[in-house]
Image (cartoon, rainbow, N blue to C red):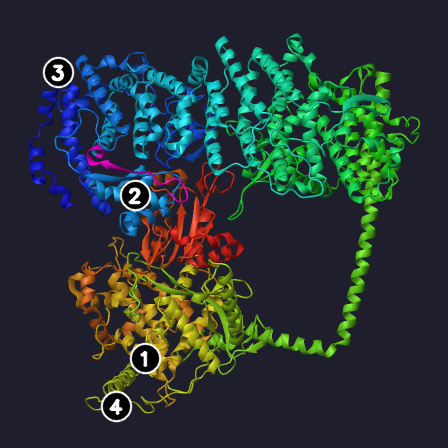
Amino acid sequence: MASAQSDRDPPFLLCSEFLNFSAKDTALRWLVSANLQQEVYHHLAVYVPRILCLGPSGGSSREEQREEQREDLVSQMLLLAPLEWLLLGEEPASGLALLQENNQPSPLCGHVFKVGEPTYSCRECAADPTCVLCMKCFLESIHKEHRYRMTTSGGGGFCDCGDAEAWKKGPYCQKHKPTDTNRDTEEDPVSVLPADMVARGFSIFSILLKYAVDMLTWDQENQLPAGLDPPAREDTYYCMLFNDEVHTYEQVIYTLQKAVNCSQKEAVSFATTVDRDGRKSVRYGDFQFCDQAKSVIVRNTSRQSKPLRVEVMHSSVVAHQCFALRALSWLGQIIQYSDGLRRILCEVGLQKCPEGEYSSLVDKLMLNDSKMWKGARNIYHQLLMNSLLMDFKYKKVFAIQFAKNYRRLQTDFMEDDHERVVSVTSLSVQLFTVPTMARMLMVEENLMTTIIRTFVDHLRHRDLQGRFQFDRYTAQQAFKFGRVQSLIGDLKYVLISHPSEWSEQLRLKFLEGLDAFLELLKCMQGMDPVVRQVGQHIEMEPEWEAAFTLQMKLTHIISMIQEWCSTDERVLIEAYRKCLGALSQCHSGLPDGEQPISLSLAGHCVDTFRYQVSQDKVSIHLPVCRLLAGLHVLLSRTEVASRFPELLPLGDLSPPLLIELPLRCLVLCAQVHAGMWRRNGFSLINQIYYYHNVKCRVEMFDKDIVMLQAGASMMDPNHFLMILLSRFELFHIFSSTDCRKRYREVNKDVVQQNNTLIEEMLHLIIMVVCERYVSGVGQVEPFDEVRREIIHQLSIRPMAHSELVKALPENGNKETGLERVIDSVASFKKPGVTGRGLYELRPEWNKHFNLYFHHYSRADQSKAEEAQRKLRRQNREDTALPPPSPPPLCPLFGSLVNLLQCDVLLAVEGAVLQWAVEPSGGCWTESMLQRVLHLVGVALLEEQQQLECSSRELDVTFNYTCKITRPGEAPNTSGSVLALLESLQNAPHLEVHKDILTWILKMVANIKRMREQTSSTFTVNISQDQGPEETVRDKDKAERKRKAEMARLRREKIMAQMSEMQKHFINENKELFQQSLEELEASTSAAAADSSPPSSESTCVSQVCVGPRRVGGAEHRQLVTCILCQEEQEVRGQGRAMVLAAFIQRSTVLSKNRRHNLPDPERDDPVFMHPDLSLGIHTASCGHIMHATCWQRYFEAVQLKEQRRQQRLRGHTSYDVENGEFLCPLCECLSNTVIPLLPHTHSPDHRVDHPSLEAWLKTTNQQIAALHFAHRKLSNGVAEGAEPAVSDGFRVDFIPQNPFSSSIREMITTFGMSTYKVGLKVNPNEQDQRVPVLSWSTCAYTIQSIERLLMDEDKPLFGGLPCRQDDCLSALTRFSGACWTAAPPTTVQTHFMRLLAALLPDSEEENTPSILDIDMFHLLVYSVMSYSSVHCLDQSGQRAVDSSHLHLLHLVTVAHLVQILLTSTTEEVSMDQDSGSEEEELTSRLYNTLRKHLGSVLPEVTSGWQLFRCLKVGFLPFLRAAALFFHYLNSTTPPADLLVAGPSQWEALCSFLNLPSNLLQLHHTQQTLLEPFIHRWCCHPAVRQKLQGGGGGIVSFPRESNRLIQLPEDYSVLINQASSFTCPRSGGDKSRAPTLCLVCGSMLCSQSYCCQTEVDGEDVGACTAHTFTCGAGLGLFLRVRESQVLFVAGKTKGCFYPPPYLDDYGETDQGLKRGNPLHLCVERYRKIERLWRQHGIAEVIGHAQEANQTLVAIDWQHL
């Protein structure tokens, strides 16, 4: 930096020059100059290089920000202020305010969206899905009450509020509603401005815009445009690195570290800036210095791909380019003040220069777009939006220029490697979606044709026939193909809204566009043909995806073109002609010379040609055919065919040719199903899948069926079916003379294939005849079509809204029509805390179910059939699934019904029925029969409908019943179809089909009766014809009843036999049973005694869990079973160790101070826990027990397996074996240690004496003094003074016998080490004095967290815990009571002395924390646990440990009472109670004592009632936790009062803990004894300091339970917050993945390089780093843009969890793909909160990673 400044003016000179600079004077000088451009350029030439780009841009982001602010300030003062003065002719601030005041606000909102900002589109009123509102406009509009879609913006678009063409209704929000004053929008806004300002505006804008355009399109690195050369030129250059989309972040970072010798952090900063802004200078200095860096970068990045773009640019060029961007931003700001100035700028921008057609400044910018860097593009696009697109008049002019340049812009975009969002081509969405503008461009600039031709030109890969050929696509071609698809998007914008009125010109240009489109479709017709592989499997899978991608992209375009055609009859007729012509050309291209053949069957003959799908080429892609099918349906729907038959070329149609190609395609699908194309690999299977898939089927499969229907309706039905049989290669089966006897085929595979083909063919006939739910084929509306789809989807099973949406095809507006229909056919069931809302079909719609619905896959069909049969059985109905009544056909397709009664079909039906009558081998299938019965049923329904609708029998042309009663003609003289049906009815092997056969025969009888009635009375009355049906039904019911009765009797007989066998077995093994029954009785009676209400002995003495009167409730044996070896064992101190799988983790769930830094593990002293509980250790268990030896063997096996796995696969598992983690062998719960099971505590010895508190204190003080003496002696070798006197039997040097076996001792050490390792994050060290403290700590913390949970969930203190938590607490507490045996006695004794010194004065102990800095429950647990080490030295046998526990509890209780009174924040209340009870009086007395010691630091409180109430509420959590602790420590049975949840438990708790119910009695009765202690507690210097407000916050009691943060009810509020969140490290850049911490509410910039920090020597992302400060390594986050909850544990573990936000259909929307409005589900959020508070997050992550191995591979540390 220093070298840079030495070359330039010293900074103080610049400063003085700046201070003397007058913008006003400069402007006045410019005003009178003859050549303004020359003056301005000279000014810029002098100042720009001295203000901007003054040296290397490295350093910290803060320095960069400061430099940027300086540049902004100086640029404004020296460069922009004179321009503002010149433009306004006065002080800029007042001038701009005046301009704004006189400006009529535009009705257009024009708010440009930031990345990730929420946008709203009304699904009812938007003209198309691109019409969106910003959040402010949306909330003020009528659309918030409608159905709307919410998405997050990719950035770049703008709000359409105020654009009348974008909305069907409600175009304005309240804010932008035009007032009457600005109705006259025709007035030119420029005329409002003063004439001289207009003139100045023109000249300033043209100078500045030309300057900016010249600089941004400047391609010389070393020279400047004329007039801008600086007075003094220096040798200072920048090495400028440009962005591309080819190289990865890692490549760029690595290269920069090598090239410019910078640190990893600086390289990351460079890379993120390059990615964000498009370019960044990475080195500053002389030319050679920069050029050297350039050559290294180019060399390093050119190995695999094209090198990174790097240029060495002179600093003055860079400075002028930077100012050019500022100038454009300034122009954008200035025009916001006045519509007049906006229009002037538009005029300047679009003014043609003398150079010619494309010479305006805007043209120049557009045509150089791909040469600019990202930042420059963004700024000028923003300016175009703020100016040209906000002015209706110039938007049109701009649109015309854009359309003129369209081809060149798209060609540039193909070569450019930047994303479309930063390309000028992306502006098409702003222009082409305005319907009037799109049509104007179509007419004036022939836009539709231009787009299609540009598209076709860029797809150059063709085969010899001119069809597209995508196979063997290179990566470069695939990239280009991806780019080309954006053109389809533009075409979609143009066609998205069809015209209501057509002009001649529009017709002409649309049909011209259609010609171009047909050329495109002709290139697709027949592409990717396939030939069946025989003998050998295909070697390489052919490329098929590109062709289907193209088809998918064009699907909506094809549908839209049909919609356009449907709105004008002339266009439709002409389009039909053109399409037919195109199809004829395609047919003429078919290989000729196909051998003609003649087929005859059932007395009919047809001429066709030989073609076999299984041998010749066949293609799935037939877009020309399918477009013709669509147009043919429109002829029928619009009735053009019946009104203008003479105008249509129907005579040119050759029906056999029309059906040929679609039929081949459908036969191909059938043969693939039959397994004939297995050797063609997966590519063909995938093509067939997509052909039927909802994304493609509308313009593929559906149209093929329509084309067959169209062909069949124009042909003799017999001829149609014969061609069908021929193409299915089944003709030989049905044409043989004895076809009803079914040929005997030797090859089983061929038989199976033919069976499947017959099934598929029959299915196709069903579809051709029955699929009438297309408006134009059947007399239906689109509404009926959607309803039928929904009915058939819900017939499979109840479905969620999103599943239904996926199953329905979307139109161009992303709508499926679901919402209009769904409520009429289905009922909605809301979800619970898990799952999602489901729609169930209403029962009355079941009759519309069609088993052969054409959109069912085979799996769907079988599921639906099963579901429907099950439903009918539940409703006690027969299980027949007859076809539903079909809607009538439209006239053009009317003759389709004749298929059902034609001779060929009857021959086929007869043959299949005959095969079924005489079943032999595998020559027919039940599916085949089922399809034939379905066809018979459809024919009967058709006949019944015709009879019902006609008045005389003569009108009925459909006489199926007559035809099926005729016997077969010679030579097939076998029975008629009806006779065969009747013989099948009673066939035993067809029980399944009995119901449908019964239904068919009923229908036949019914129709016969109707015919008889019609011929006699001309009236039809079906209601009287129910008689025979009823009798048949009754017979069926009786038959069913008889079968059910027989089944019941059979069941009873079997049950009786089993019972007899059991008795026999018991009699034989009597002794064994007697013995086990006795054991069972004994154990149940013991359990009853343990859990029943207190017995007579214990009711007279109430239940007590601590002190000499405690009742030992657990003398019975404790038997447990090992889950690994299944061996049962009693828990004994000297027995084999049994252990409980457990998981220890650090926790901040109870923390009251999240800003607390994590302690230094080496120096941390955990003896005293602070009351803010900022970091605890929590232990949980799944409750499964093992032998210690079994567990060790299991863990060794896990370690071995992990070593082998690591050699094979790198990466993590769901557990970290190196940290001792494993999965419980039984439930696979994450564990990292084991807790040893220890025996119950013995009952107290009632013979020993129980000293008073005073006596105990005296004895304990003596013992402590003796221990101090002994410890000093031990450490120094000598101790001064006499040895203190101690009571009898107390020996300091006594070493007690360890009560545990070696295996239990080993396990005690194991768990102690685990707690130490996890709690302090250090390596194991058994000698560390802190080991026992951490074991006590986890016991206390776990009890506290469970007590909070029980309290908040209103559960009883005892009996409300699950077994696993109960067992865990029991084992943990007893372990903590015994862990002192594994530590050196002196260590534990030292801890006890330190702990007691916090309560009692001890001259030996220094630095004891104040009473306000100690958590009293931890102190109680630690003291009780550590006292055992002192008590064991007393060999007299005269003192019980129980009385010591009670005295310790009393002391801590008094200390906690004082602690609560010191921290209570009582508000003075006026309603003072009249009579003061004893409790209140004693509370006031104690409080006054404290005030005596502390003086005015404590406020005066007169209300004893209020003090006591505070005391009681604050003290309750301690009481509850202490009760849990002593209950588990001493295995005492809790009293009945505490087994139920309820408010009044104070007395029960006090009694259980052997405390007076008025706790203040403890102080009152021992006042003289306790007074000095209280005095000492109050006089600790830290107490006064804290109470006066210094030394950190005071924790008041009771501590409120922590909750997760409050989330807004509406999700869009969160999205809005996230969109305005900027990355804290990269200078105001928008964060790509804003992530909200649910624990503390911080918003983080996740998943990005910029916010990575180092933790333990490893780079981690913002979320992972945050977990270590906020959650001790565990975090819960909400990824706002993905609507996804993220759980993270440590650096390697994480999982995604469903968010608590649901849409109206009870579903989450992870990834915000569907866009339905989301609202907070409180129950689900509470569930997440409960997981967190139960410390279950790590367990959830473990289970998720076990279930889904892909989660393990994610680099969670980078999030």
Q: Is residue 311 magenta?
A: yes
Could you say whether the residue bearing mark 2 is in a helix, strand or loop? helix
Sequence-wise, which precedes: disc 3 or disc 1? 3
Q: Earlier in the sequence, mark 4 or mark 1?
A: 4
- Where residue 742 appears, x then y in whole percent? 86, 37
* Image x and y of residue 898, in percent: 78, 21
Task: State the mark number for residue 34.
Answer: 3
Instruction: Mark 2 and mark 4 in contact? Answer it, CB < 8 Å.
Output: no
Look at mark 4 in the image and give the residue it sits on.
Answer: 1285
**Mark 3: which amino acid?**
Ala
In which quadrant is the N terminus drawn?
Answer: top left
Residue pointed to by mark 1 = 1387
What residue type is disc 1 on? Thr
Instruction: Give the spatial CA distance, label 2 vs label 4.
Output: 87 Å
Contact check, label 1 and label 2, Cβ < 8 Å: no
How crowded is the residue under tag 4: few (<14 C-alpha within 10 Å), some, or many (20+)?
few
Specify whether 52 is left or right of 216.
left
Marks 1 and 2 sit apart, C-alpha to C-alpha, by 67 Å
Bounds of the magenta segment: 302-318
Q: Which residue is mark 2?
A: 295
